[in-house]
Image: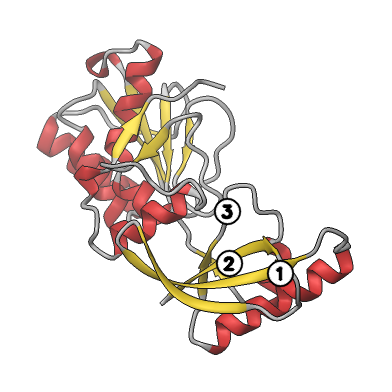
Amino acid sequence: MVGWLTETQRRGWRPVLEVERRAGVLLCRGDCPLGRRTGAAARRRRLLRTARSLLEVGCRRCLTAPAFDGWPVLAEAGLCPVEPGPLCAALAPRLALTWLRRAGIPPERATVALAGRRVDRALFEAAAALAPQVRRLAVEVPGGEGEDLLACLGREYGLPALEGRTGAEVTLCFSGAEGEGSGQLVLWGKVQLDGLMLAGKSPLPPELERLPLLELLWEEGVYKADEIRVLPGWSG
């Protein structure tokens, strides 16, 4: 089970654990008590105690509030966040097309780059989905895997073989590929979507950070990938 760490103003110092259902999934909520005069050191001790309580009942990953700033403490205890990278990678084609639509660039005139440490399933499926819709695909993968994918795209779709992301309007950065700035969508680790937003088919609990919650709902089969909406959001 995945944990959910909350902080509540109440008396006492002991964490309270209880199983709750949120958005269709069961979570083990670990509530950390905070007093009005709780200082930084005391808060740290209580967060550690709550995190260890969640670990003791088998929670290895944890959800938190959107503005939660205590992750260094939870990581010290051994808790991990729910990483939204796998979901974002699965939604890569829709993310790229939504970004192009927001920028006012027709897909049939656009170059989309796919970058990664290797050609994994998510990168390959994104290439196959985008190839019939865009003008050009570029691939930035070290070694022979990238060359093989470029050759495959050329045979199947007649696309020109472009290496590297230079000249691409939008780049999808899969596992191992770095990206920063406008048009660089990082789909692993610390996800960066350049203002694009994901939303559920129904309103989500505001007390939980949205992307990790959507990842969990997708993992648990509560949402299918095509039930998750990709919104243009804003351009930074």
User: For this view, does 201 lie left or right of residue 188?
Assistant: left
Within 10 Å of disc 2 (Cα), the crowding (few <14, some 14-19, many 20+) is many
Q: Which residue is mark 3?
A: 65
User: For this view, does 71 lie left or right of residue 229?
Assistant: right
| Amino acid tagged 2 | Leu
Q: Which residue is mark 2?
A: 5
Residue 85 percent across, percent down from the top left: 43, 53
Of 157 and 64, the residue lying toward us = 64
> Which residue is depicted at the point 23% across and 24% down?
134
Mark found first going from the N terminus, 1 or 2: 2
Above or below, 143 against 166 in this view is below
Within 10 Å of disc 3 (Cα), the crowding (few <14, some 14-19, many 20+) is some
| Residue 86, visible in the rendered structure | yes
| Amino acid tagged 1 | Pro
Does the residue at mark 3 contact the one at mark 1 (Cβ under 8 Å)? no
> Which residue is depicted at the point 41% across and 27% down?
170
